[in-house]
Amino acid sequence: MAYLPFDQEPSPYAMMNLPTREQAGVLIVSVSGAQGHPPVLLDFGGVDYISSAGLRVLMMASRRAKAQKGAFAIAALQPLVQEVFAISRFNLIVPCYASVDSACKVLGS
């Protein structure tokens, strides 16, 4: 379960359910209840490597978002990850933006 600092108010989108569990030393976050909520944007600014398993998870998240009539995108890809996305043509499956700000300009209301 994620916790907010005392000085932070909960988001109006707190209805999104993000339960967590640990399995084999891995923190797993299960996303549900996103239908009718704003687009989900992953900030990949701190990600410098992605495996084929990671790409598969992102593809499944993208498909689930589309099935729920939601939007899912990624921003701030580091050069190596951006190259993997381009070579695998994954950037044609999931919208990718140069920065969080540029993504928010397109995805935001």
Image (tube, rainbow, N blue to C red):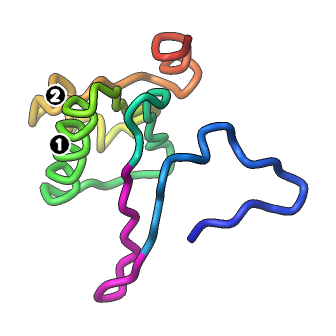
Q: Amino acid at mark 1?
A: Met
Number of other residues with Cα within 10 Å of mark 2, as a class: few under 14, some 14 to 19, many 20 or more: some
Q: Amino acid at mark 2?
A: Ile
Residue under numbered circle 2: 93
Marks 2 and 1 in Cβ contact (< 8 Å): yes
The answer to which of 79 and 59 lies nearer the viewer is 59
Q: Quadrant of residue 35?
A: top left
Whichever of callouts 2 and 1 sits on the residue coming sooner in the sequence is 1
Residue 9 in picture, x, y percent from top left: 81, 48
Residue 23 in picture, x, y percent from top left: 31, 84
Figure quadrant of the C terminus: top right
Q: Which residues are magenta?
A: 21-32
Residue 75 in picture, x, y percent from top left: 43, 31
The answer to which of 92 and 107 lies nearer the viewer is 107
Is 18 colored magenta in this rendering? Answer: no
- The residue at the point 50 percent across, 43 percent down is 45
Q: Residue furthest left?
A: 88
Number of other residues with Cα within 10 Å of mark 1, as a class: few under 14, some 14 to 19, many 20 or more: some
- The residue at the point 67 percent across, 37 percent down is 12
Is 25 colored magenta in this rendering? Answer: yes
**For this view, does 59 lie left or right of residue 29?**
left
* Number of the label disc, if any, that sits on residue 59: 1
- The residue at the point 47 percent across, 31 percent down is 37
Q: Quadrant of residue 13?
A: top right
Secondary structure found at label 2: loop
Secondary structure found at label 1: helix
Figure quadrant of the N terminus: bottom right
63 over 53 or under it: above or below: above
Residue 41 in picture, x, y percent from top left: 45, 34
